[in-house]
Structures are given as structure tokens and as C-alpha cells.
Amino acid sequence: MSTSDQYTYQSGFGNHFSSEALPGALPVGQNTPQVCPYGLYAEQLSGTAFTVARSNNQRTWFYRIHPSVMHRPFEPYNKDSHIVGTFDTRTTEPTPTQIRWLPFAIPNTEHVDFIDGLHTIGGAGDAALKSGLAVHIYAATASMNKRAFSSSDGDLLIVPQQGRLDITTEFGPLMVAPNEIVVIQRGMRFSVDLPDGPSRGYMLEVFESHFELPDLGPIGANGLANPRDFQTPTAKYEHTNEEWHIVNKYQGELFVAAQDHSPYDVVAWHGNYAPYKYDLANFAVINSVSFDHVDPSIFTVLTCKSAHPGTAVADFVIFPPRFEVQQHTFRPPYFHRNCMSEFMGLIRGEYEAKQGGFLPGGASLHSMMTPHGPDSQTVKNATMRDLLPGRVADNTQSFMFESMFQLRLTKWAIDNQQRDHDYYKAWQSIPVTFNPNQI
């Protein structure tokens, strides 16, 4: 698989960006002149309410050939959809059982694009109330042909596992490879091409707030995901008279509207509400250099904060390649019952706490207060090994979507043929070594 990327980007996180595909396309000194340069139309995309504090206010001004309102009425999408936006007893089921899925199947047909390849695993809350989140996977075999997708429900964090995604947005193009992520926020239209053929990956959708960098506290000013490593596209437009279809995710359901021009006719834009990508290899890892396995929050890339300080609607956490040097320590992830829900995926390699079974393209869910931890073989190895300095997770990248919400699973996820019903056996042969006569 190629990792080449021919596109140009602007660097930074949360910046106020400016980009124009034609010189002078951005108005000078105002947002909405009576007549915009080149005969363009000004259109604002608001990511927050007008009256949100300036420090948190997000919006972008487009200068485009057609206002995006120039489409025919939305109608229900007439294809079968496996997307869910309200997580109640009608659409989902709860279970505290530890669940693992083998790699999700890629369709054996040549005509499943990103939209039709989306399946909701589970979630919590209600998109209509702007409360909660959803976890999806995608498995696609075809590029999107004259179709664009957007979610009115929330921000999308996409994690490719197999195959690059060549993504066209109103802001410009992005090439996103496995071990990179891309965030496309509420209301932004995009199309996905598959330059490497069939593709699979994961998607986290948050219905409230936006992703931001985690606070660093006593770590200081630097470390974890550094702002300069995030990349935002530059303007590129197309001017066509071909028919396009805009597919909109709204309250968990899909609707489609036709129009007779490309939605990617933005010649210039400026603002701080824009899509971005990030290479996980740039993450500056923090770890213990003395003793004990510290909490996985030190591996947080992005967080979507809740109204409760220190608690997240969702955190995006990775477990990257790193050194391990702790002495007198059980080095794998500890046994745990968590007040958060943990959905894990594997991009490549082998996760350090699971020996087999947890495979690239698969996933696991450890629900709130459900016990979990390293499997039997990992426990045996960890208690007997020499604690020499060494490397862990080389050529591996696993990640976690962690949430304060209890997740309910869709029937598609619960009944999926890739569900590993023997997952519980991973812990059954952990040895009992207790001896009341020996400390």
C-alpha cells in the first residue's frame, strides 16, 4: 500500500486558517461584501452558537460558486442502512459481557461505497438532543461516485485500518492512511475515494461539543499530540454541471438530495472550523521510568469534554510503540473495572495485553464496571520475565474510544458473525498463585 500524499496542508490545531485557490478570492477587510471577488457567494458554516464565548467559538466563511442551498428537497435514503442515532430499547440492547469481534468482514461486492459500508456498533444518548456518541465501522469496496456525505448529528473521527482514504471536502482534499486519523466535523460535506481498493476502519461520532487537545497539567507545555502536527487542507475547487447527490445523516437516519453541480465549488475560505488529519507516529509518548503501570490517560490524543470537569464524552487514546523500563512492576495493562466504557480497535500488529484473537480490523468492548485485563498467557509471561529495559508495541498500533456513557449495542453488532463467543476463555486459565504461608 502506498503512503504517498500529493496534497498540501496548513499546520496547526484550532488555528484561524485562510486559503484560496485563486489569488484575491478572499475578501479583504470584511466577510460579506456586496459582490464577492470572482462573482462568488459568501456562506458561513457555524460549528458553535453565535453567542458562545470567543475562546470556544468556531465558524468558517466559504466563498463558493453556488450557495449550498441550491439543491432539490431531501428525501429518505431508499437503501438499507445499518446506522443508528437513538440508542433505546427499540434499536439496541445492553450487555455487561466482555465482547470481542474478529476482523469485520469486507463486502464481497464491488459496489459498496463509504456511505453504504457504514454500520453502527453501539452508542449512547440521542443525536436529536445533542447528547451522547456513536461508534461505527466502515467496510467499503468502491469510491463514492458523485455523492457527498455529511452528518448533522456530530463530529466524525475516522480511523482507517486497511487502505488509504482519499477524501474530498469543501475545504480541500486530504489523503488519510492507516496510522493516521481524520476529524470531519458536524455539517461538513465530504466524499471518499479508495485508491488502494477495499477499505475498512472505525469511526467515532460525538453528538455534543467538539474534539480538542487534552490539558497537559504538570506535563508542561509540550508532549502527547503537539498542535503543529495537525494538518488542515487547502482550498481546491471544481466547477461542473453534473448531477450530484448529497446524503445527510440527520437524527440517525439518512436523507438524500439531488443537485446539478459539485458541492466542492469553494474557491476560498477562512475560519477555525475545518477538518484536520493527524499522523499517530508523531505522538510524543509519556510513560513511567521508575515503577508501576500508569493510567492510559497519558496516551490521550484528543478529547471531547463533557459538562463534568475531567470526564469525557469520548477520549481517543492510542497505545503506541515505546520503551518500557519499569522495575518491580507488572508491566502489562492492569486488571481493571472502570467507570468508563472502553471500545478498542487494532490498526496493525498485536496488542500487548492479548496474545491472539484481538486482530487488526477487529474490536472489543469492555463496558462500564465490567472486569477486564491481560489474558492468561500475557499474565504468565509478565510474572516470569526479566525486567530489562525494552521495547513494547513495535509495528503495532491499537487505540481506544473511551466514554463516560454506558454503550448499548445494535442488533447488527450483537448478532454479527464475527463476534467471538469464546472471548471469556481468554481469562479462565489465569493461575491461582495465592499461598497464605508465603509472602
Image (tube, grey):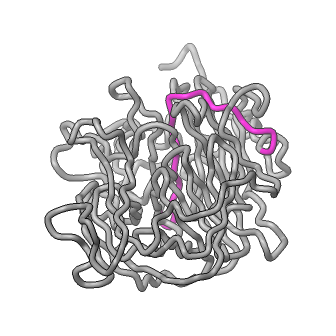
Which quarter shows the N terminus? bottom right
202 lies above or below 197: above
Count of residue discs: 0
Q: Is residue 409 magenta?
A: yes
Residue 118: image location, x then y, percent: 69, 56
147 lies above or below 119: below
* Farthest residue, direction top: 436
Q: Residue at x 45, y 53 (%)?
A: 185
Residue 299 seen in this snapshot: no
Residue 274: image location, x then y, percent: 37, 59
Q: Residue at x 75, y 41 (%)?
A: 423
Residue 399 as seen in the image, left or right of residue 213: right
In the depicted view, which residue is nearer to us: 77 or 365?
A: 77
Q: Is residue 43 magenta?
A: no
In the depicted view, which residue is nearer to us: 143 or 219?
A: 143
Task: Give the image quarter of residue 410.
Answer: top right
Residue 43: image location, x then y, percent: 37, 60
Residue 179: image location, x then y, percent: 49, 66
Residue 427 seen in this snapshot: yes
Q: Residue at x 45, y 75 (%)?
A: 265
Q: Residue at x 60, y 52 (%)?
A: 345
Q: Which residues are magenta?
A: 394-412
Residue 99 as seen in the image, left or right of residue 279: right
